[in-house]
């Protein structure tokens, strides 16, 4: 299972980097989104999920689940949503002002 998760994180990261380096704005937005998904999976995998364990210390059961990775993933989800909305609005503004959707603003054909 760990190999499958690490493979999924690697594929998401590779696809995200490939799309983020494209020349048009929409693939860049998709690439940044895939990179944020890869980071979320990585943060969630850091938590070593424990089934049947309480999320806080002192509830009477031996051991506990670390709540920090879940909190980091929730924060990363909110930040990635805000970043995606900002980049989409920035791309729409650039498209309206420049007349094309190239990242560098030039029409290279």
Image: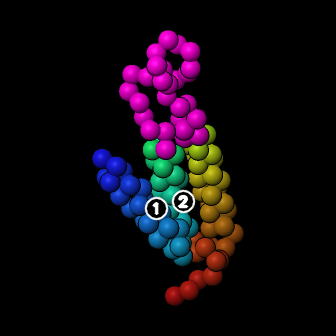
For the image, the number of numbered tags is: 2
Image coords of residue 97 (percent x, y): 69, 69
* Residue to which mark 1 is pinned: 13
Q: Distance between the residues labelled 1 and 2?
A: 9 Å
> Tag 2 or tag 1, which sits nearer the N-term?
1
For the residues carrying marks 1 and 2, which lies nearer the camera in this image?
Answer: 1
Q: Identify whether 77 is placed above or below 83.
A: above
Image coords of residue 51 (percent x, y): 38, 27
Image coords of residue 54 (percent x, y): 48, 20
SS at mark 1 in the image: helix
Q: Identify whether 53 is placed above or below 25.
A: above
* Residue to which mark 2 is pinned: 32
> At 32% across and 54% down in the image, what residue appears?
3
Q: Is residue 14 left or right of residue 66?
A: left
Residue most extreme to the bottom: 109
> At 45% across and 44% down in the image, what residue appears?
45
Segment tinted magenta in the rendering: 46-74
């Amino acid at each position: 299972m760990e190999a499958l998760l690490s493979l999924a994180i690697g594929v998401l990261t590779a696809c995200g980097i490939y799309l983020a380096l494209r020349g048009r704005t929409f693939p860049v937005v998709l690439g940044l989104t895939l990179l944020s998904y890869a980071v979320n999976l990585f943060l969630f995998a850091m938590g070593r999920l424990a089934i049947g364990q309480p999320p806080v210390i002192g509830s009477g059961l031996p051991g506990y689940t670390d709540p920090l990775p879940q909190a980091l993933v929730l924060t990363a989800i909110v930040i990635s949503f805000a970043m995606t909305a900002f980049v989409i609005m920035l791309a729409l503004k650039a498209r309206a002002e420049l007349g094309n959707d190239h990242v560098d603003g030039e029409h290279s054909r």
